Image (cartoon, rainbow, N blue to C red):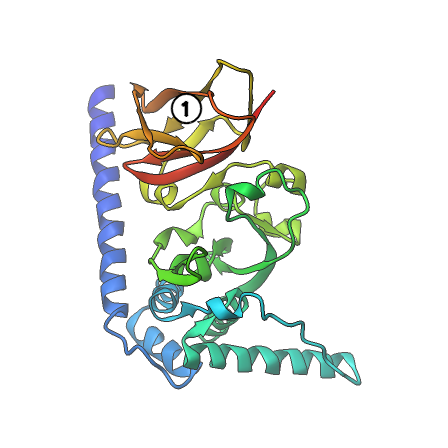
Amino acid sequence: MFHSFKIVALFIFLISSLGIQAQNSTLEKQVLTYPSRFNSVEALANKINADFHSPEDKAKAAYVWMTHHISYDVKGINKQKRVAFKYSSEADLIAQKKAFRKELALKTLKRKKAVCEGYSTLYKALCTHLNIECEMITGSSKTFIAEIGNTRLPSNHAWNAIKLDGTWRLVDVTWGAGSVDYSQMRFRRSYNPSFFDTEPSDFIINHFPDKSQWQLLDQKMSIKEFGLQYQIFQAYWDSNIKLIVPQSGILKYKKGESIQFRIENLSPKSHIAYKYRNEKFGNRITVNRTDGICSFTVPMTHLRKNELIIYIDTKPALGFKCQRQ
């Protein structure tokens, strides 16, 4: 009876999962039939309101449209300016800030180009019209292995939190749209659904909010702990893995040692490889699989300070700094 119950439960779970995936696929396909341009935030919100009923579908529809049609403004990376307001009262300041956000949202929609502030401002404006509670969150982000260990990362990014069914969820429309190839200073669009309603424990790996309440974690993380975390790349999200060991982004080792890795949820069909920054080619690894946990070791044979990348199916997934003791 016990085994039969487990099989039935697993079957129900798989059917439910397939149903959710199909629903999301249908939603995305429908949103991609929308025009690529709208003259107002209200017009796009009205279209979404007409086509979808649940707040979650509406929030996801706004995310899908923006990630497919708003490009990151690479030229604006180093041109961001602080905005100063002259005001006569608190009410006047609030009114000016509201007008500024409204203008920025419309500008982002019409130009179809923005930095993170424009993305998060437009998303908040859309959610307001969709009757979804939404906040704009500012904080630090980590995008490079070289930033591991930096405990003084600047507040340089903006994202959103939305409230669905009484629970706050995390959304990063900017990162969901693609990434910047800094070697060529070009934006490369690559839709990533993983940055909609991301698990807080995953989101905190590379997003550290200025206000700790927006970590949405029971046990809050310090900026020092944030800085010491490993770096994650696209394959991490695509493969749905979880790194169990090591937990630090800085791997300290002695000559001749190997570092132990344990990963959860790796597909049986996937393979692992590693590469140091100063190596020309990667190295495939033999993986031991036990009860859904994959274990492998990486020999630490290079210079004192180096960068190590773990690949899943030839795509970078995890990044670490290596320090020889």
Q: Is residue 106 above or below residue 287?
A: below
At label 1, the amino acid type is Arg
x then y, percent, for residue 241: 37, 35
To which quarter of the image does residue 181 belong?
bottom left
Q: Is residue 213 above or below residue 226?
A: below
- Is residue 150 visible in this depiction of the protein? yes
Q: Residue at x 34, y 23 (%)?
A: 294
To which quarter of the image does residue 46 belong?
bottom left
Q: Is 239 in front, or is 323? A: 323
Secondary structure of the residue carrying numbered label 1:
strand
Residue 203 left/right relative to 283? right
Residue pointed to by mark 1: 262
The quarter of the picture where the C terminus appears is top right
x then y, percent, for residue 58: 37, 66
x then y, percent, for residue 158: 56, 61
Badge 1 crowding class, 10 Å Cα cut-off, few under 14, some 14 to 19, many 20 or more, is: some
Q: Residue at x 55, y 37 (%)?
A: 229
What is the count of numbered marks? 1
